[in-house]
Amino acid sequence: MSDSMSGMPARSADFIMVLITLVLVMMAPAHAADEGPSVIDDDGNRLSLPAPAQRIISLAPSMTELLFSLGAGDQLAGVMDYSDYPPEALTLPVVGRYDALDMERIVALQPDLIVAWRSGNPRGALNRLSALGFPVYIAEPDSLRSVGEHLARLGQLTGHAAQGEALNRQFSDQIQQLQAEFGSREPVSVFYQVWHSPMISVGGQELINDMIALCGGQNIFAGLPVGPKVNLEDVLARNPEVIIASGSSAEAPAWLDEWLRWPQLQAVADQHLYVIPPDLVQRHSLRALQGARQMCAHIDRARQ
């Protein structure tokens, strides 16, 4: 005990020591082990959890895939319709489809994290879930690199930070390898057809456009917004060297052969009509790398 306190009664000295200890505890920063995960989502909002989430609801098939990739599949309490990969996702409760959420079921499941898709979920429903106190992570992946970034963030929120960072690095490395191999090769004009009636292509701020550019291709509708509706005259005027379609299944859509009616198109004349399974190019998941590799192979054939 210091000289200044040596003459105090024992009880007074003890009381002062208790006060000093309390002040020091209050002034000390919180220990890192006591802090829960905290990330910034694609709305620019910081989402902080008291602890890694253990009851997660995923409102997008792509986010469901990412969570399983992280090893967080056992922490999923509910998923969106069409969450069919990996097969284990099919055993989980379905809490809605892209245009309508089953709010009662979501609330009944009492999630401690909801992973949402900004452009694929009803915004009003997401706002209501937030107002009810549920933590909502908003995702809007728009490129291949954003897939890795979401893996890293979701890894933190679910207690799989190391796995998330490792997958992010691996994913980024493989993107760079594709870029180095194909990105500087001779440009090839590409028409990507998502659907036939109405005819829908891809704009400049979409995952498929990012893949085309990665492969050294040029999306003929890159200057249009997301999911543009186009017409036959637009495609004929731009005369793409490659036409790639997706459709609704892994099989080639019947309407891809309709382009054979237009032999003046370079893609038709040179027989560069291809198909890529939609789940490999329309979902922001690790499988997007498979889609990108197929995309690069198709585009590269046109260079031959």
Image: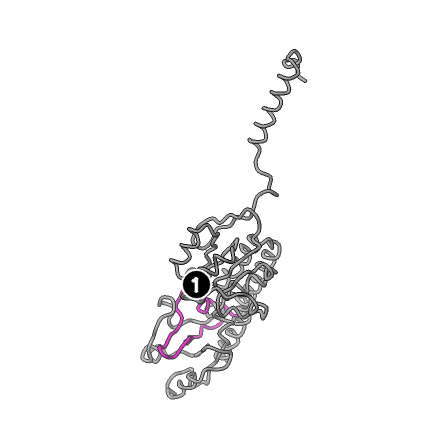
Q: Quadrant of residue 236?
A: bottom left
- Residue 266, magenta (yes or no): no
Q: 25 or 147, which is in the foreground?
A: 25
Q: Residue at x 48, y 64 (%)?
A: 95
Q: Quadrant of the N terminus?
A: top right
Q: 190 or 136, which is in the foreground?
A: 136
Q: Which residues are magenta?
A: 182-210
Instruction: Find disc 1 in the rendering and name its residue.
Output: 101
Q: Residue at x 58, y 24 (%)?
A: 19
- Using the image, determine if residue 18 lies above or below residue 60: above
Q: Is residue 159 left or right of residue 198?
A: right
Task: Look at the image and name its color scheme.
Answer: one colour
Spot occupied by residue 113 in the image (x, y as percentages of width and height): 51, 54
Spot occupied by residue 39 in the image (x, y as percentages of width and height): 51, 50
Q: Residue at x 62, y 54 (%)?
A: 162
Spot occupied by residue 294 in the image (x, y as percentages of width and height): 53, 75
